[in-house]
Image (cartoon, rainbow, N blue to C red):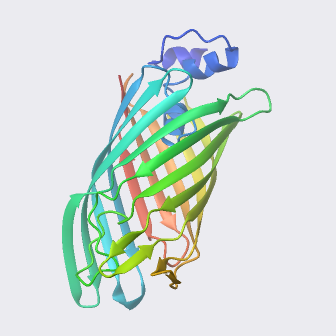
Amino acid sequence: MLERELTPARIGTDTIADPAQQDASTDSNRALERALVRERALLLSPRSTEVEPNFVASHSSGDGGFRRTSFGPGVTVRLGLPRQWQIEGTLPYVFETIRSGTQSTHANGVGDLSVAASHQFIAEIDRLPSVIGSLSYQAATGRNTSYERRPLVALGGGFPSLQASVNAIKRVDPLVFFGSLSATRFQARDKGTARVQPGNIYGLRFGTALATAPATSLRAALSLNLLNKTRIDNAPVPTTNMNAFLELGGSAVLTPSTAIDILIAAGLTRDTPDFRLIVSVPTRF
């Protein structure tokens, strides 16, 4: 109770009959819960809005002297809805430099717009974890020249996609364990004179978070993705079968309405980006 009094809360005013749900809502402004909202393992209370300016940087290297460095700002907006629903949208802006051998290209522009809807199907009670399902769509708004006879630009993925995921969390004080399963389906597109169908991606992610204090938290996670083969004119092409990330993050409440979250991800396989840094400052209204 003392922790909750010391940590200002900005939560919905709906009456919650279930004591467990009421307890979770009262804690919604603690750093741990703010981080879990970013993980889609916890939803905003009804009529709450969160605007999250963020900055993302990544670096990739590969065979033949290939190097790609990208960075840029973005914004995510989340809105809590009644009956345990939440919607969100994300739009990034990307600056990138790609070097392959002696050639180098520079580009910048809008990345891929994504929208998502999430719903809590099961509330955490006793031994039962909280379960949230999400459906998201990513539009190919970012320029991408992959599979085309022109200098490579990869401001976005290049193909529209639809992803379904299931997220679960279980609290075992002082830790919270979270995990997710996801499946991503890409839409085929014409690239030059060829029809390209990227392979589906099946993801598994699990980790744990620790509330080091009411206003701070730490977390670690392992993310694995299995990739089906890409097909060009219905013929399979050699592609990576799996990639993996090790993620370390932390969050802190700065003011009654604002927090900061930092996540660093390191690639564990050859064709995975070497590292990725995400700094976000979510603010609630």
Seen at 43% across and 49% down, the residue is 137
Instruction: Using residue 277 as the reference point, say whether residue 177 is left or right of it.
Output: right
Who's the residue at 35% across and 73% down the image?
Answer: 190
Is residue 112 visible to the viewer in this orientation of the structure? yes
Q: Nearer the viewer, residue 147 or 93?
A: 147
* Residue 162 percent across, percent down from the top left: 48, 54
The percent coordinates of residue 148 (x first, y second) are 29, 80
The residue lying toward the viewer, choosing from 246 and 78, is: 78
Tell me which residue sits at (33%, 76%) in the image.
Answer: 191
Question: Which quarter shows the N terminus?
Answer: top right
- Above or below 182: residue 105: below
Residue 215 in sight here: no
Query: Which residue of the protein is positioned furthest toward the right in this rendering?
Result: 127
**Left or right: 235 as drawn, with respect to 96:** right
Left or right of 32 in this view: 19: right
Write down the quadrant of residue 49 in the picture: top left
Could you tell me which quadrant the C terminus lies in? Answer: top left
Q: Nearer the viewer, residue 284 or 139?
A: 139
Looking at the picture, tell me which residue is in the foreground, 172 or 140: 140
Q: Position of residue 164 (x, y in %)?
A: 56, 49
Residue 46, above or below 166: above
Please report the residue visible at 61 percent of the width from the left and 37 percent of the height from the top.
132
Give residue 269's quadrant in the image: bottom right
